[in-house]
């Protein structure tokens, strides 16, 4: 028996949660079943390939007549089913990340990425970040796997932060970062680059990755007699820590580490709460050399990573329209932190 209004509300919330979870499972299972249907159709089409393109054309006509409300039965899509079958016929079960992605994502991965290991990695990132097909294409074209997974990352994270956070922080880093900005001259200074980044905040958050929340630019830190300004300040929800980003429009110089180290300490003194993990610093330079960075990091107590960056022409309108707005991101952050 429900005794109080509070009990009633709890019951209702539990029912709502159950319905939402069940709906998600239904959609997920439906997607998986569709992929396996396409796999079986692809097998049949491949077994009848001796009849050439006419078989696919006739099959498309017959299927459209029988299943008039069903999409995806065009000759082009049937041809893609054959490619899908040939790609995975050597395994009994489709890898879980791929089985959870829509057909459009799966075929995009086959078309854009020939290495299966990399393909599965991109599929995992799709699920983690909720990438649309357009954003997935952008990430593959920008060689995200190489920049985030393969390239050497220079940091002192291993010695300065706990193992779990250390691994997440290293996985977070990219080298190089690619910022797609507009209206920048060849001789642009750091302030120009920073302002262009802020004009395209969605692109900026896309490049920094999952969990990043923008706190501010030229963020003021004050002492008794001086004021200091941090280029870009973020809070990462997954790492549960502030991330201080310093942008340098020159090659790496050892003194940049000292400046960033000071800013990290300042954030720890003025912003960091007991519930926050160690503040992390990220120095972005045009170019760097490994030995100089490693020497500069010796003796530094705060966790710092150093990466290069490139600036390319701004991201397409199609991608921007499919990214969440700054308000959407903040709403998501508010929900996660409650």
Image (tube, helix red, strand yellow):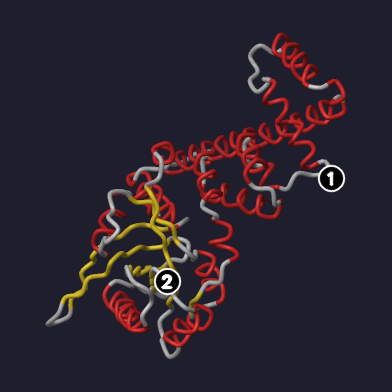
Mark pair 1, 2: CA separation: 43 Å
Question: Which percent across, then down, holds residue 107?
Answer: 65, 37
Question: Which percent across, then down, holds residue 301?
Answer: 41, 86
Name of the residue lying farthest toward the bottom: 299
Name of the residue lying farthest toward the left: 225
Q: Residue at x 41, y 58 (%)?
A: 212
Q: Nearer the viewer, mark 1 or mark 2?
A: 2
Quadrant of res 63: top right
Disc 2, SS: loop
Report whether 148 appears left or right of 250. Answer: right
Q: Does residue 275 appear in this view?
A: no
Labelled disc at residue 90:
1
Question: Which percent across, then down, holds residue 181?
Answer: 34, 51
Instruction: Name above or below for residue 240 compared with residue 158.
Output: above
Report whether 251 appears left or right of 8. Answer: left
| Residue position marked by numbered label 2 in the rendering | 287
């Amino acid at each position: 028996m429900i005794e109080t209004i509070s009990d009633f509300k709890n019951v209702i919330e539990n029912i709502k949660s159950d319905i939402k979870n069940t709906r998600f499972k239904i959609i997920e299972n439906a997607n998986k079943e569709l992929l396996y249907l396409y796999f079986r159709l692809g097998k049949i089409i491949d077994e009848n390939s001796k009849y050439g393109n006419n078989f696919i054309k006739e099959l498309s006509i017959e299927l459209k007549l029988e299943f008039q409300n069903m999409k995806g039965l065009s000759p082009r899509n049937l041809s893609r089913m054959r490619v899908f079958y040939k790609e995975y016929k050597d395994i009994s079960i489709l890898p879980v990340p791929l089985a959870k992605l829509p057909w459009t994502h799966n075929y995009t991965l086959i078309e854009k990425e020939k290495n299966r290991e990399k393909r599965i990695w991109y599929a995992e990132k799709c699920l983690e970040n909720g990438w649309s097909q357009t954003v997935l294409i952008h990430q593959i074209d920008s060689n995200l796997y190489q920049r985030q997974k393969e390239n050497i990352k220079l940091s002192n994270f291993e010695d300065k932060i706990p193992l779990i956070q250390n691994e997440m922080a290293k996985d977070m880093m990219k080298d190089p970062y690619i910022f797609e900005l507009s209206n920048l001259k060849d001789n642009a200074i750091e302030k120009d680059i920073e302002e262009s980044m802020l004009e395209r905040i969605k692109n900026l958050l896309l490049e920094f990755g999952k969990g990043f929340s923008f706190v501010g630019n030229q963020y003021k830190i004050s002492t008794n007699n001086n004021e200091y300004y941090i280029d870009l300040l973020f809070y990462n929800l997954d790492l549960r820590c502030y991330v201080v980003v310093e942008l340098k429009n020159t090659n790496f110089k050892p003194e940049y580490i000292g400046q960033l180290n000071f800013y990290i300490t300042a954030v720890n003194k003025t912003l960091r709460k007991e519930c926050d993990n160690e503040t992390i610093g990220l120095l972005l330079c045009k170019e760097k050399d490994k030995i100089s960075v490693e020497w500069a990091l010796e003796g530094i107590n705060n966790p710092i990573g150093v990466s290069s960056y490139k600036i390319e022409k701004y991201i397409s309108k199609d991608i921007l329209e499919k990214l969440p707005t700054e308000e959407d991101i903040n709403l998501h952050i508010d929900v996660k932190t409650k």
